[in-house]
Amino acid sequence: MKKVLVSLIAAVVCLSLLTTSIWAGSKQRRRWEGVAIGVGAAILGHAILKDYRHHHTNEKIGVDRHRGTYYAPPPPQRHRRVDCPPRPSRRGHWEIRKVWAPPTYKKVRNPGHYNHRREWVPAKWIKIIEQEGHWIEKEVWVGRR
């Protein structure tokens, strides 16, 4: 589908670059040029779409006069073969455990100011708690030995 879309866009761009948009002349001349461009684009689009559908259908293919026709095979299916043993089951179980999530901080610019002793404190970056630390429940796979 991508190939069809890309080729259609390329054709439209080429057609738009080939024709000039501003010419002096009669209105009828421009009208028939537009009709010709539209018909050409429709024919080109139909040919591209027909070719795309032709390659993606399960249609009859002539093989032999005596045997009749042959249908193209369906795509192969992915499944477990009969002669392969099944996979062993994983031993273990899920447990819910409590885990401590540490607090998260964000950096904030603290502008310069005077403190309570009337001393100048220069500006600096400080950390402020964005979210407090908390317990979360998490599922953990515990395997047997």
Image: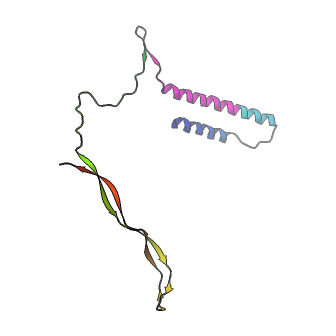
Write the residue at 50% across / 83% down: 112
Residue at the outermost right position:
26
Position of 126 with respect to 10 (left or right) is: left
Q: Is residue 50 magenta?
A: yes
Please tell me which residue lies in front, 20 or 48: 48
Q: Quadrant of residue 26?
A: top right
Q: Is residue 13 above or below residue 84?
A: below
Residue 33: percent from left, percent from top: 73, 34
Write the residue at 58% across / 27% down: 47
Q: Is residue 91 magenta?
A: no
Q: Quadrant of residue 65?
A: top left
Residue 18: percent from left, percent from top: 67, 39
Please tell me which residue lies in front, 34 or 131: 131
Q: Is residue 87 above or below residue 122?
A: above
Q: Which residues are magenta?
A: 36-64
Write the residue at 48% across / 81% down: 123
